[in-house]
Structures are given as C-alpha cells and as structure tokens.
Image (spheres, rainbow, N blue to C red):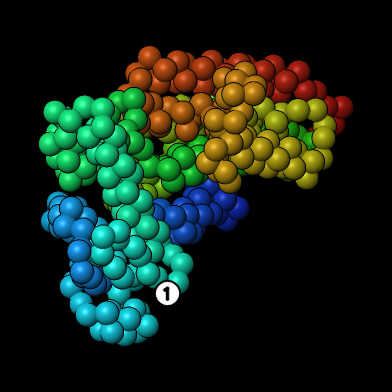
C-alpha cells in the first residue's frame, strides 16, 4: 500500500494542472481578496479639522460640548478658534472641513460633501437634540437638569458590534473562509485524476492497472490517500499563507483549523473520485460537472457575496446542511466567531459521513466495470 501511495504522489506532482488549480490559484485569489478588502476593517478616518468662529452671545454650552468631544481620546475632531475671514480662507484651501459659527444658536458652514462634513453635521445635530431634551427636563423635571447636562457632555460609544462569542465580527472574513472551502473542494480535481487512472477505457495507464492482481479496493484507497495528502498539503499551505504571510486575524486554534481542513480535503477528493467513476461519460463532461459543482457550492457559501450564505440560511437552510463548502466555512466561523463547538463537530461529522458514502459508491461503481478487451 505504501509503495502504491508513494508512486501515486510522484505521478500527481508531475501534473501541472493538479498543482496549479488546487494550490496556486487559491493563493492568487486570496492575495487579490486581501488587497481588495482584506484589511478594510483596519482603516481609520483622519481627525476632522474644524474652525470655530465665536460671535456675540456665544453658546458656551456648545463650546463645552465640542471640547468634551475633542478631548475624549477618540481624536474625532480637532477644533481651532479663528476669525471669520481666516476660517473662510482655510475652508476654501481645504485646510479645515467646516466652520462652526457659535452665536446664540450654533451653525455649520461647509464647502463640500463628504464623510468629514457628515461627522460635523452629526455632532451639531446631536447637540441640538440634547439641548432640546434639556429644555424638556426643565419643564417637566427640573431636579434632573444637572444629570441631563452631564449626560449630554459625556458623549460615549455605547454600542459595540461583537459576535456571540464576544469577538469582533470582521465583515470580510466570510470571503476568506469560503476561499479555504473552495480550496478544499478543488481537491476534487486531484481525486478526479485518480479515478481516471482506474478506468481502463480512458487511459493506457488505467488499462495496465486493471490487469494487475491488485484488489480494486486497494487501488481506490491508495489513490484516495495519495490524492488526500496532496490536497491537504495544498490547504495547509494556503492557511499558512493567509495567517502568517497576509496576517489575517484568524483567532481560532490552529489545531481546530487543521482538523476542518482535514475533513474538507477529504470531501473534496471523495467528490472527484465519485464523479470520475460515473459511467462512460467523456472526460471533458466530468470535468465540467466537478468544476460547476465546486463553484456553485463556493458561491452559495459566500465566495462572491458575503451575504449569500445567510440568504440561503433564511430561505432554504437545508442547502447549507448538505453544501460541503458551506459546512467548511461554517466550521471556521464556529471557532473564529461563534465559539460554538457543538455546531463545529456537527459540521465535521456531516463531512465525514458524506466522504464515506462517496468513497463507498465509487468503489461499487469501479468494481462493477468490466471490459471485453483492453
């Protein structure tokens, strides 16, 4: 058996298509994903520069409000007191994004539309809303006036987006999880090549192997193990590249990630061997089937649209329960985001059962093949 596995690996490594699609293509695609949006969550907006022009009867409460925002540690705005002419000059030269004209009623002057201007407008709107609330407190509950003023001045971020496990949700993570799932499924190309070498009517090599006394089950298992080892190696290389070269924030334990990749690679190879064992269909038709199947599964798992998997879950959840790419990406979510180990093991169990069924079916299909002459 070891002898068969060794030479099967050597044969596969000499096949460029076997090397390119399951390994190099996902790495190239992952690199493009990374430069497109891989570190989008790390992007920061620059501090918004704003000018303050004081007028007679300036609203001191608004000035206190701005000072509180400027010095709360978030570096949201940087305010500078200017004369009206100097402020307009800086605004025209785009040295500041807006001007707060602070009279009895503060107002905002901007020269363009954009995120900095929207931030300044939101600050002014927040102040006006708070001031209106204080007026209502004065009329209905005067004893709570000081508490209301303190609450308005101490503007704090009270809502934080976190996962069920308490970890921050990265909106672009789904693309990379689906990419790993696609790489696992691309092991079907390796498995397909293995099945072709076992059908005497397709290749001369298969014809020679079929006349040997080696048991068909032994041939199939040796091909599957060799294909699995190569496919698993490809996925491990991709994981190392994403985690340690591109430095993506995969927070789960590497052991759990390797276990997912193990079963993912197993199902990918099993699909390839099964499709390759189907009837006497031409090789091109079988390649079309496995390519279409792997890409449709990857699409439904969120490779092209990170909301697709959730959309399928809401409308037809049974697809996510049998889609191998969705099971793989969901298992990654379980350890990196959800912290749901029962769901994690359920996904792995489903992948294992599907692999066993496919390998058994492949053996039955290949065993029944007979030829008048080879």
Residue 207 in the figure: left or right of residue 281: left
Between 339 and 139, the one nearer to me in the picture: 139
Between 124 and 115, the one nearer to me in the picture: 124
Asked if residue 290 can be seen in this view, the reply is: no
Image position, residue 121 (x, y; %): 37, 58
Between 205 and 139, the one nearer to me in the picture: 139
Quadrant of the rendered image containing residue 213:
top right
Image position, residue 339 (x, y; %): 32, 24
Q: Is residue 237 above or below residue 47?
A: above
| Residue underneath mark 1 | 111
Quadrant of the rendered image containing residue 355:
top right
Can you say which quadrant of the picture contains the C terminus? top right
Residue 209 in the figure: left or right of residue 50: right
Query: What residue is drawn where x is 70% and y is 40%?
Result: 292
Query: What residue is drawn where x is 32% and y is 49%?
Result: 128
Q: Residue furthest right?
A: 372
Q: Is residue 186 above or below residue 14?
A: above
Query: What residue is drawn where x is 75% and y is 34%?
Result: 200
Query: What residue is drawn where x is 27% and y is 39%?
Result: 135
Label 1 Cα crowd, 10 Å radius (few <14 / some 14-19 / many 20+): some
Image position, residue 327 (x, y; %): 51, 26
Q: Is residue 131 above or below residue 61?
A: above
Asked if residue 307 can be seen in this view, the reply is: yes
Quadrant of the rendered image containing residue 287:
top right
The mark total stands at: 1
Q: SS for tag 1?
A: loop
Image position, residue 264 (x, y; %): 48, 31
């Amino acid at each position: 058996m070891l002898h068969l596995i060794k030479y099967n690996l050597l044969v596969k490594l000499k096949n460029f298509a076997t090397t390119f699609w399951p390994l190099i293509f996902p790495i190239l695609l992952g690199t493009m994903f990374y430069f497109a949006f891989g570190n989008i969550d790390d992007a920061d907006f620059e501090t918004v520069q704003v000018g303050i022009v004081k007028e007679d009867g300036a609203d001191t409460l608004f000035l206190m409000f701005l000072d509180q925002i400027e010095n709360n540690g978030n570096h949201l705005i940087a305010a500078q007191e200017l004369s009206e002419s100097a402020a307009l000059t800086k605004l025209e030269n785009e040295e500041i994004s807006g001007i707060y004209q602070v009279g009895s009623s503060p107002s905002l002057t901007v020269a363009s539309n954009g995120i900095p201007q929207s931030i300044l407008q939101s600050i002014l709107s927040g102040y006006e809303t708070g001031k209106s609330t204080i007026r209502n407190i004065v009329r209905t509950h005067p004893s709570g006036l000081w508490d209301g003023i303190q609450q308005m001045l101490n503007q704090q971020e009270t809502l934080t987006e976190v996962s069920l496990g308490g970890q921050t949700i990265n909106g672009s993570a789904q693309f990379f999880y689906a990419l790993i799932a696609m790489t696992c499924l691309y092991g079907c190309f390796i498995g397909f090549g293995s099945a072709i070498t076992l059908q005497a009517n397709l290749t001369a090599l298969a014809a020679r192997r079929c006349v040997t006394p080696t048991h068909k089950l032994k041939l199939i298992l040796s091909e599957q193990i060799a294909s699995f080892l190569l496919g698993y190696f490809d996925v491990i290389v991709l994981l190392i590249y994403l985690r340690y070269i591109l430095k993506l924030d995969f927070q789960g334990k590497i052991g759990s990630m390797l276990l997912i990749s193990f079963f993912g690679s197993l199902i990918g190879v099993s699909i390839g061997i099964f499709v390759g064992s189907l009837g006497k269909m031409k090789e091109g038709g079988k390649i079309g089937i496995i390519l279409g199947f792997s890409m449709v599964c990857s699409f439904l798992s969120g490779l092209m649209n990170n909301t697709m998997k959730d959309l399928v879950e809401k409308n037809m959840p049974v697809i996510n329960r049998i889609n191998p790419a969705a099971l793989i990406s969901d298992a990654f979510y379980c350890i990196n985001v959800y912290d749901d180990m029962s769901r994690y093991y359920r996904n792995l169990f489903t992948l294992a059962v599907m692999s066993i069924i496919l390998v058994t079916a492949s053996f039955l299909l290949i065993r029944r093949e007979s030829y008048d002459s080879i």
